[in-house]
Image (cartoon, grey):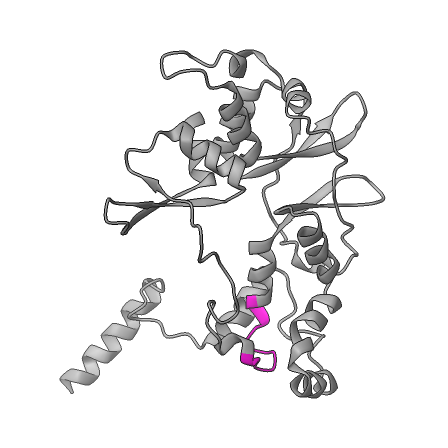
Amino acid sequence: RGSTENEIRRRTASLSTPHRASDVQVDPVQSAILFRDARGLPAINPFLTLDTYQILKNDEEQIFAKFFGFHRCYDLIPTSAKLVVFDTQLLVKKVFFALVYNGVRAAPLWDSQQQRFVGMLTITDFIRILAMNYKSPTLEMEELEEHRLETWRNVLKDVKELIYISPNASLYQAIKTLIHNKIHRLPVIDPETGNVLYILTHKRILRFLFLYINDLPESSILHQSVHQLNIGTYNDIEVAYEETPIIEALHKFVNKRISALPIVDKQHRLTDIYAKFDVINLAA
């Protein structure tokens, strides 16, 4: 009887504290359905008809290609998301403070004279500006106080046309665009209004796949290691030490085109990671 009362008490308590993992057990499949519903996505993917499932099961190499080919960029856009846009007339320092304040890593750039979006501002741009403007540890970087984004775009020779995609384009086309142009962020722009709807990234595309991964036919690729699939860098790895100057790390990011630096000790044991996004804290 005592154990029964304890169980009833535990269940009653769980109603008032549903966030406690010890009190709530959720079926992963049901959890995925609830998560899709919260994002305004269909609980059952219309792509996964019985016929399609059987075809994919017999040709597993096409599972992901056909999945992304079926879905549009619009399908990935959440019902609510934060989007920050900067005018090219803003001062550089204020812009990077705004990135930190809003917790975003990139933002579309609007040219008020041309009345159109002309580019993207990313953490890489901030790193390039710092690397070019650094003179010595004792001198302040006055240009960050005085120069506007438009000025720095000319200095960095960043005048190439903005690469973007329509919300009606497939996610497969979006992935090809990201890879072909060697970019990490792809604005989704409404062709009728010219408004930016969302910023596509590799992470957000993978997260969308994750929502339906348990519903897709199982692929043998998922049972292979990252080393077997040749994903990652295994030779000539750039590293930094705790005493490495920040400016040296910035130059590595720019010149080696890497997104993170492993921080190692004198025995080359990994102690931490210094990523590109960490650099934005210098503006805080």
Answer left or right for 190 relative to 238: right
- What is the x, y in percent for residue 257? 54, 42
Q: Residue at x 53, y 35 (%)?
A: 254
Is residue 104 visible in this depiction of the protein? no
Judge left or right: residue 275 versus residue 207: left
Q: Name the outermost residue toward the right.
A: 192
Q: Quadrant of residue 173?
A: bottom right
Q: How many marks?
A: 0
Q: Quadrant of residue 44?
A: bottom right
Say which residue appears at 74% left-offset and 67% top-offset.
69
Residue 207 in the image: state x and y as whole percent. Answer: 55, 61
- Numbered range of the magenta stretch: 210-220
> Does residue 85 show up magenta in the picture?
no
Asked which quadrant contains residue 24, the reply is bottom left
Task: Using the rendered image of the protein, determine whether residue 273 is visible from the camera's viewpoint.
Answer: yes
* Name of the residue lying farthest toward the front: 236
